[in-house]
């Protein structure tokens, strides 16, 4: 596990490119209980003005926060996490010209709080160059 | 129909207990791994115990399901004025007081914190205080829904 005293603001925490498919959306819907059809049916998604099926915002955040968990080594060290949902992640059908979606996640140390024993990690998530999370942050409890 | 600002301040008591199971944690961890490796603390009780936990640990966003089912008490209430077909998730935050682990029985108390109108949309902020059935604080969830104007 990283030590707070050895970190500096701006340090890289990690990055990942994650390919999401329609099957991943179904799996997340079942695991989270969020069965909103805009995440599974192009027809329903288009009927409410979306380009087609989009990923659950909280799937995007769940994927993004894994980069932080992999870095700190203990999921329970993440004592706070939050985000705004600022952009959509359209996920193409398997037979579409561009199936699925590539989510690019990177994270850096945004702030250190020695008194609280925590580091704030700032997460950037983009899809096709568009930011899909805003002010995505995780607060991680670390040893001094 | 706009959401009435007078809805702010409404509260709901702890709802039905939500059983945190090993299977649910493993399924959620696999779903958010999207084909990548799953941290063993989510699946292996021995690894979780070596990190000081009673059983496998939930991922940081796992309690979204409990929070959303509690939020539904407001969203699905005809008196709320929320048209669910116009709802998008605006913000979400979890503050963990201790990690949720398999074996927990959790309940959520809901408070509608604010209803604001901005650029023709209604922004509804809801807080869930999630505790064990015995009252031990586990997590505070805050969700903001955007109800798009017509």
Image (cartoon, coloured by chain):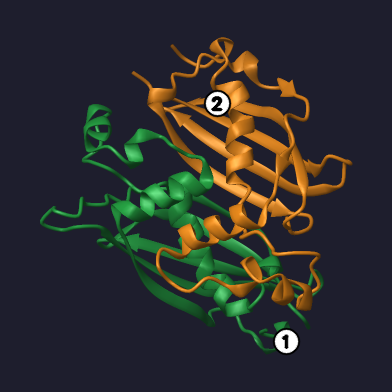
Residue B39 as seen in the image, left or right of residue B82: right
Along the line of sight, which residue is nearer the eye, B71 or B48?
B48
Q: Secondary structure at mark 2?
A: strand
Residue B28 as seen in the image, left or right of residue B134: left
Give the letter of the chain under mark 1.
Answer: A
Give how far apart the Cα atoms at labels 2 and 1 are.
42 Å
Q: Position of residue A104 (x, y in %)?
A: 35, 68
Q: Is the residue B29 above or below the residue B92 in the image?
A: below
In the rendering, what colour is chain B? Answer: orange
Q: Position of residue A82 (x, y in %)?
A: 58, 53
Q: Are marks 2 and 1 on the same chain?
A: no
Q: Is residue B120 visible?
A: no
Q: Which chain is green?
A: A
Q: Which residue is mark 1?
A: A5
Q: Position of residue A47 (x, y in %)?
A: 23, 27
Category of crowding for the residue at label 2, using alpha-carbon neighbours closer than 10 angstroms: few (below 14), some (14–19), many (at least 20): some
Write the residue at 63% across / 77% down.
Answer: A72
Q: Secondary structure at mark 1?
A: helix
Write the residue at 27% across / 49% down.
Answer: A90
- Contact check, label 2 and label 1, Cβ < 8 Å: no
Write the residue at 30% across / 51% down.
Answer: A22
Residue A56 as seen in the image, left or right of residue B117: left
Q: Which mark is residue B116?
A: 2
Q: Position of residue A101 (x, y in %)?
A: 27, 59
């Amino acid at each position: 596990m990283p030590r707070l005293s050895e970190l500096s603001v701006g340090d890289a925490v990690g990055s990942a490119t994650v390919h999401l498919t329609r099957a991943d959306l179904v799996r997340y819907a079942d695991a989270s209980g969020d069965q909103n059809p805009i995440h599974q049916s192009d027809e329903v998604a288009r009927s409410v003005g979306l380009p087609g099926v989009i990923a659950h915002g909280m799937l995007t955040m769940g994927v993004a926060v894994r980069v932080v968990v992999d870095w700190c080594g203990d999921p329970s060290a993440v004592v706070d996490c939050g985000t705004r949902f600022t952009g959509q992640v359209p996920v193409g059908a398997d037979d579409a010209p561009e199936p699925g979606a590539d989510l690019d996640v990177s994270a850096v140390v945004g702030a250190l709080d020695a008194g609280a024993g925590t580091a704030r990690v700032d997460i950037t998530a983009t899809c096709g160059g568009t930011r899909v999370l805003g002010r995505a942050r995780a607060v991680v409890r670390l040893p001094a | 129909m706009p959401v009435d600002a007078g809805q702010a301040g409404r509260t709901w008591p702890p709802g039905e207990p939500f059983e945190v199971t090993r299977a649910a944690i493993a399924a959620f961890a696999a779903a958010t791994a999207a084909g990548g490796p799953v941290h063993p603390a989510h699946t292996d009780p021995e690894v979780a115990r070596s990190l000081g936990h009673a059983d496998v640990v939930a991922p940081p966003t796992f309690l979204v399901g409990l929070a959303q089912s509690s939020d539904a008490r407001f969203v699905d209430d005809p008196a709320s004025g929320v048209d669910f077909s116009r709802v998008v998730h605006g913000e979400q935050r979890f503050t963990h007081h201790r990690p949720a682990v398999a074996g927990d029985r959790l309940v959520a108390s809901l408070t509608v914190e604010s209803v604001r109108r901005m650029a023709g949309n209604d922004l509804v902020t809801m807080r869930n205080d999630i505790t064990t059935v015995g009252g031990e604080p586990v997590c505070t969830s805050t969700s903001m829904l955007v109800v798009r104007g017509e």
